[in-house]
Amino acid sequence: MDGLAVAEGAALGTALRALLGGGLGLLAGSFLATLVLRWPEGRSLGGRSACDHCGRPIPLRDLVPILSWLRLAGRCRGCGARIGALHPGMEAVAALMGAAAFAVAPGAGGWLGALFGWTILALAVLDARHLWLPDRLTLPLLALGLAAGPAPLPDRALAAAIAGGGLLLVLLGYRWWRGREGLGLGDVKLGAALGSWLSPLLLPPLLLGASLLGLLMALRPSAREAIPFGACLGISAWGLWLWSALR
Ligand SMILES: [Zn+2]
């Protein structure tokens, strides 16, 4: 093969990987949207999907990610009630994350990066909607980062300790200074988990990116008093993972 054919083969391989990652992302996003809607209400994940308004079970042909929602113009086929954009939105974002992760990192790295991104997506939505970062997502993320994060083990363990310890100091300092909670322990555990996927050198840009996102959220006209800082940290961390994998 000449150089051009090799380059074409590589581009085709990247495109096929992105397609696979995007398809898996659609499925992951569909599952995660159900998770973030039902988990905070203590509802089971097993039962069939039904319209929240009329309770009518949703037929299989209306469960195709994104397309069904678009075809029904975001309304229930039975009662015409509006169906929120959370489902198609999370499906689209998870598909983009999967496609990007699989494209920039071949093999196990792509799978791990996609899993990292999808977990962050679920955490970010839960934090934005409920200011809740469940241990059952942050702790496995920390374990997986320590076990298989992209940086050498001493680097990722140190980054996890610095990020978690630093946020714990901020939490304690804020409590002492203002007499109320600024951060939660969920943010501390998430910080440690995100650190384990990065390295100490990436922690300053992680904090900078998260602060800029937090500032943007605070400036929105619809901003609430509490900013979901965990969501900002997570988005910043996944952006840094993608950037490191690209280099
Ligand atoms: Zn309905």
Image (cartoon, helix red, strand yellow):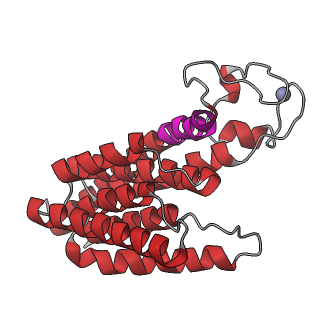
Would residue 76 be counted in the magenta stretch? no
Q: Is residue 34 left or right of residue 190?
A: right
On-image quarter of the C terminus: bottom left
The front one of 138 and 98 is 138
For image coordinates 41% across by 75% down, the residue present is: 173
For image coordinates 43% across by 60% down, the residue present is: 187
For image coordinates 40% across by 39% down, the residue present is: 136
For image coordinates 82% across by 32% down, the residue present is: 76
Residue 176 falls in which quadrant of the image? bottom left
Q: Position of residue 164 (x, y in %)?
A: 30, 64
The front one of 160 and 100 is 160
Q: Position of residue 26 (x, y in %)?
A: 52, 42
On screen, 204 above or below 240? below
Q: Which residues are magenta?
A: 26-40
Would residue 27 be counted in the magenta stretch? yes
Ligand 1 sits in quadrant: top right
Q: Position of residue 239 (x, y in %)?
A: 40, 68
Question: Is residue 119 in view?
Answer: yes
Residue 7 falls in which quadrant of the image? bottom left
Q: Is residue 244 left or right of residue 98?
A: left
On screen, 75 above or below 171? above
Question: Is residue 107 in view?
Answer: no
Q: Main secondary structure of the magenta part?
A: helix
Count numbered badges in the picture. Answer: 0
Q: Residue furthest right?
A: 79
On-image quarter of the N terminus: bottom left
Q: Position of residue 214 (x, y in %)?
A: 55, 74
